[in-house]
């Protein structure tokens, strides 16, 4: 099966064409970890699409114009037909990425080579930090997953949620990334996701410490460090006005036009689509199973916000708006220029 080096694109990537380009598919809500800061429904919702249902929806999305598929969850490797779904999507023409906690990665060696990228969560550079909120033994298993992905040659990203617990070792996490030729995605834990005073929940960074770390990350990025998001994205995070909120009803200065709901679509494990993962509890999803993808996409609500603090959405929106700095960063990251 042919693996594409260049990104799969088409006319649907253009911002003025109303067709989806990226589909974020949460194939399952089940997870094999119990991370204390998780705010998903990962332990109470077991409904999943069958392979036939999921593949039919992916075919309809591809026919509509989508070319990039990001598989997530829960833990997507718990979906029983995940290997078959990846193979189907790649054969259809999607470039497929997958987000995982790493634990089950070594059990899927065949499909690893088909992935355009694999993102593995790593919240610390040692078991003491990572396991504190993700569970005993999870660090060693994540490293085993990273090693398996590295051996398979899949482009690898490490995803780190910055909190008070790991604020002093983000540079060590970069060193782990360098060991496995992996880029690191640093994203802060936002204030609105605090869970009271529970000692099991990591504390979000205080504003000044948050700003200092973002400045240091920008300095590291300038030195061509192995950081995934662009310098411009981190500068927009640094200049965010209301740190207590991660979304804004206004388009904040410098932020790209939000294309969530137009270029980027979230598909849940029930077959419902939403304009954005962040607003799945704020807007009603449209059922692709009942309506078909084309009609559900046409009738989907717009997101209630116009800017956000989420690095992944800032970066993707910048790319889809054809921003020079994001395209350059993408090419540097993709080809290690």
Image (cartoon, rainbow, N blue to C red):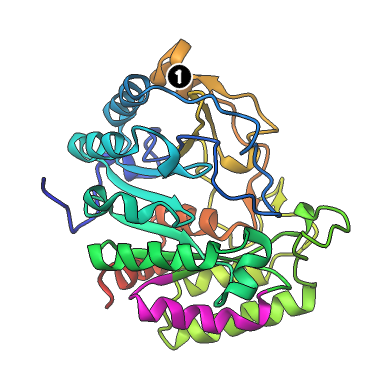
Residue lying farthest top?
290
Q: Residue furthest front?
A: 137
Can residue 263 be seen in the rendering of this structure? Answer: no
> Where 243 falls versus 280 (above or below)?
below
Query: Magenta residues?
Result: 166-183
| Pointer 1 residue | 288
Name which residue lies at 45% across and 19% down: 288
Q: Residue furthest right?
A: 197
* Residue 260 among magenta residues: no
Residue 176 falls within the magenta-colored stretch:
yes
Q: In the image shown, does 25 or 77 lie closer to the viewer?
A: 77
Residue 96 drawn at (x, y percent): 31, 46
- The crowd level at tag 1 (other Cα within 10 Å; few <14, some 14-19, many 20+) is many
168 horizontally vs 75: left or right: right
Does residue 67 appear left or right of residue 131 in this picture? left
Q: Is residue 21 left or right of residue 285?
A: left
| In the depicted structure, whether residue 122 falls above or below residue 19 | below
Q: Would residue 303 be visible to someone looking at this image?
A: yes
Say which element carries label 1: helix
| Residue drawn where x is 75% and y is 65% of the image | 204
Residue pictured at 33% horizontal, 29% vertical:
58
């Amino acid at each position: 099966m042919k693996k594409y080096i260049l990104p799969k694109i088409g006319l649907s990537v253009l911002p003025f064409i109303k067709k989806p380009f990226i589909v974020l598919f949460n194939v399952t809500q089940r997870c094999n970890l119990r991370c204390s800061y998780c705010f998903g429904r990962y332990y109470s919702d077991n409904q999943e699409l069958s392979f036939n249902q999921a593949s039919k929806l992916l075919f309809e999305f591809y026919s509509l114009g989508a070319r990039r598929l990001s598989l997530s969850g829960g833990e997507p490797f718990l979906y029983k037909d995940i290997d078959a779904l990846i193979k189907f999507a790649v054969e259809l023409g999607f470039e497929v990425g997958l987000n995982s906690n790493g634990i089950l990665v070594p059990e899927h060696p065949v499909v690893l080579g088909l992935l355009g990228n694999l993102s593995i969560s790593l919240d610390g550079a040692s078991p003491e930090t990572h396991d504190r909120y993700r569970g005993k033994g999870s660090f060693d298993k994540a490293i085993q997953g990273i090693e398996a992905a590295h051996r398979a040659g899949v482009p690898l990203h490490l995803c780190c949620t910055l909190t008070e617990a790991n604020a002093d070792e983000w540079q060590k996490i970069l060193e782990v990334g360098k060991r496995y030729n992996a880029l690191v995605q640093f994203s802060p834990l936002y204030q609105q996701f605090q869970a009271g005073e529970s000692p099991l929940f990591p504390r979000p960074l205080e504003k000044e410490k948050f700003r200092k770390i973002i400045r240091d990350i920008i300095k590291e990025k300038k030195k061509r460090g192995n950081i995934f998001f662009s310098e411009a994205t981190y500068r927009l995070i640094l200049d965010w006005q209301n740190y207590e909120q991660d979304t804004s009803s206004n388009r904040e200065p410098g932020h790209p036009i939000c294309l969530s709901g137009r270029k980027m679509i979230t598909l849940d494990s029930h077959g419902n689509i939403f304009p954005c993962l962040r607003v799945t509890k704020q807007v009603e999803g449209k059922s692709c199973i009942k309506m078909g993808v084309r009609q559900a996409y046409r009738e989907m609500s717009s997101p209630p916000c116009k800017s956000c603090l989420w690095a992944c959405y800032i970066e993707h929106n910048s790319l889809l708006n054809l921003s020079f700095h994001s395209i350059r960063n993408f090419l540097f990251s993709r080809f290690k220029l």
